[in-house]
Amino acid sequence: MRLAKRIGLIKPSATLAVTAEVARLRAQGTQVIDFGAGEPDFDTPQRIKDAAVRALAAGATKYTPVAGTKQIREAVVAKLKRLNGLDYAPEETVATCGGKHALFGAFQALFEEGDEVVLPAPFWVSYADMLVLAGAKPVIVHGSPEAGFKITPEQLRRAITPRTRGVVLNSPSNPTGAAYDAPSLAALGKVLVESPDVFVIVDDVYEVLYFEGATPPHLLATYPELRPRTLIVNSVSKTYAMTGWRLGYAAGPVEVIKAITTLQGQSTSNPAAVSQAAAAEALAGPQDEIAPMVEEFRWRRDYVVDRFGRIPGVKCVRPEGAFYAFPDVSGLFGRAWRGAPLGNANRVCEFLLAEARVALVAGDDFAAPNHIRISYATSRDNLRNGFDAIEKAVGALG
Ligand code: PMP
Ligand code: GLU
């Protein structure tokens, strides 16, 4: 079979692959604790499901406008005002099939062969592949564990060349949970203000999952002058436990929104009508579910950091947000398993799946091969049992 060359440029999503492997093992009857899946373990709040049922009864079963219904676009506008203090018009927004497809559309609309896009690392696996599909070259800038996985303004400045067309910022971050505080975000923003040819993509999907007090002001609230060359990408997936509804959105300059909409009109047509109605309720309705969810994630973050801290050979930076931690496991690479040193993060994950029945994602595709990612979007019981099993398995290594 001859497939198009572009397929050879990308690989399956490492995060979705682990989720699939867990499902495969469970279908065989093998019990596995899933620390791999990047999705909340909470259920979608009832008020949102009820809104979806009402919408179906009212006929939300047809195509909608390509960029989304009036209702969802107005809900996005209201959310950007309420949470971020930003003013957008409905025409400056588009509803998409998940935040993922907003990013896909944005990269296709903005970048082409020869363009460089600065990608702070460790980064979510899909950015790099989606950029390559658009023909762009990801320029990877590593935030070191010592710097809490954050890049410095100097690093950003150095990475920007005359070929740089974009930068992707994701705070709190997948996979590290690192989040810029107000001064460090402002320092990056200043570099961006001074780089007028760089388009800024801000991926806010984890914005409410911040554990260090008041959420820092949005980049665009601090630097409104960046607005004409910034696209905000967000989603209801993480904030409202709605991963399966596939509803994301973007807000930005009308030209970019129109370009994403044209692409959408020639690909997905529109996100599911019922999901748009549910997401409108999610964004515009009462927000009471969020605070208890954030509290629970904060507790789990503390627990995870504490448990990793007690495992020799593992070093874990304390994340400030999201629901991931990203420990360095290179201290285990020299330990022997099945007659050979573990050697790399993939094999550490293989070992933990085989011996502790715990699924994690290796750091390679996040551009951090000494690390593994744990998603703690799972119950306290699962965390306790999973860490007990990890501790026991590591203790038994040669
Ligand atoms: N951005 C980041 C950083 C993510 O981790 C995810 C997770 N899937 C997404 C975007 C997209 O999420 P979704 O498509 O479910 O909205
Ligand atoms: N973003 C989540 C993760 O990193 C969901 C899977 C995906 O889309 O990558 O696990």
Image (cartoon, rainbow, N blue to C red):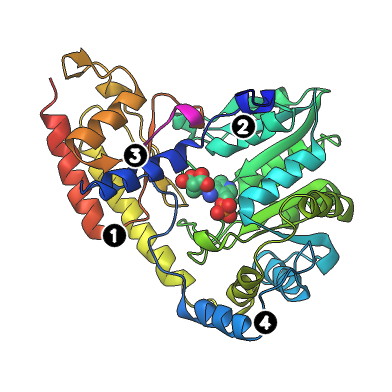
Which residue carries the number 1 mark?
379
Q: How many marks?
A: 4
Which class describes the residues within 10 Å of circle 3: few (<14), some (14-19), or many (20+)? many
Q: Quadrant of residue 369?
A: top left
Badge 4 or badge 3: first in the primary sequence: 4
Judging from the image, what secondary structure is the residue with disc 4 in?
A: loop
Give left or right: position of 324 versus 389. Answer: right
Judging from the image, what secondary structure is the residue with disc 3 in?
A: loop
Q: Which mark is residue 360?
A: 3
Badge 2 or badge 1: first in the primary sequence: 2
Whether residues under marks 3 and 1 lie with C-beta atoms below 8 angstroms apart, the answer is no
Which mark is nearer the camera, 2 or 4?
A: 4
Judging from the image, what secondary structure is the residue with disc 1 in?
A: loop
Q: Is residue 143 visible?
A: yes
Quadrant including the C terminus: top left
Q: Is residue 235 above or below residue 182?
A: below
Amino acid on which disc 2 is placed: Ala
Which class describes the residues within 10 Å of circle 1: few (<14), some (14-19), or many (20+)? some
Whether residues under marks 2 and 3 lie with C-beta atoms below 8 angstroms apart, the answer is no
- Disc 2/disc 1 C-alpha distance (Å): 31 Å
Q: Residue at x 67, y 62 (%)?
A: 271
Which residue carries the number 2 mark?
128
Whole-percent x, y for residue 206 in the image:
54, 54
Q: Which mark is residue 59?
A: 4
Q: Residue at x 51, y 67 (%)?
A: 240
- Disc 3/disc 1 C-alpha distance (Å): 15 Å
Quadrant including the N terminus: top right
Give left or right: position of 77 versus 100. Answer: right
Amino acid on which disc 3 is placed: Leu
